[in-house]
């Protein structure tokens, strides 16, 4: 049970990081394009 939980946490962490990076990237593009 522990390995499964650990794997799930790691996957969720990577997904959250990717989503955050993507959001920041699109926000930056939007700011550049709107000027």
Image (cartoon, rainbow, N blue to C red):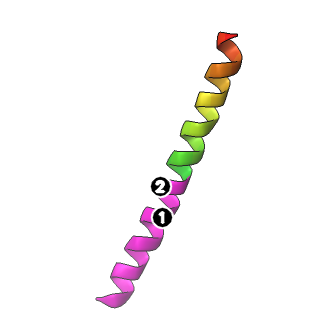
Q: Which residue is the site of mark 1? A: 13
- The image quadrant that residue 5 belongs to is bottom left
Where's the N terminus, which quadrant? bottom left
Give me the residue at 45% from left, 66% from top. Answer: 11
Most foreground residue, 26 or 4: 26
Q: CA distance from mark 1 to mark 2?
A: 5 Å
Residue 17 relative to residue 35: left or right:
left
Q: Position of residue 19 (x, y in %)?
A: 50, 47
Q: Position of residue 17 (x, y in %)?
A: 54, 55
Q: Is residue 2 magenta?
A: yes
Packing grade of label 2 (10 A; few <14, some 14-19, many >=20) is few
Dot 1 and dot 2 residues touching (CB under 8 Å):
yes
Q: Which residue is the site of mark 2? A: 16
Q: Secondary structure at mark 2?
A: helix
Stretch of the chain drawn in magenta: 1-17
Q: Position of residue 9 (x, y in %)?
A: 41, 72
Residue extending furthest bottom? 2
Tell me: residue 30, above or below residue 26. Answer: above
Give me the residue at 48% from left, 56% from top. Answer: 15
Packing grade of label 1 (10 A; few <14, some 14-19, many >=20) is few
């Amino acid at each position: 049970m522990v390995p499964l939980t650990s794997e799930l946490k790691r996957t969720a962490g990577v997904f959250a990081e990717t989503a955050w990076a993507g959001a920041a990237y699109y926000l930056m593009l939007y700011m550049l394009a709107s000027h």
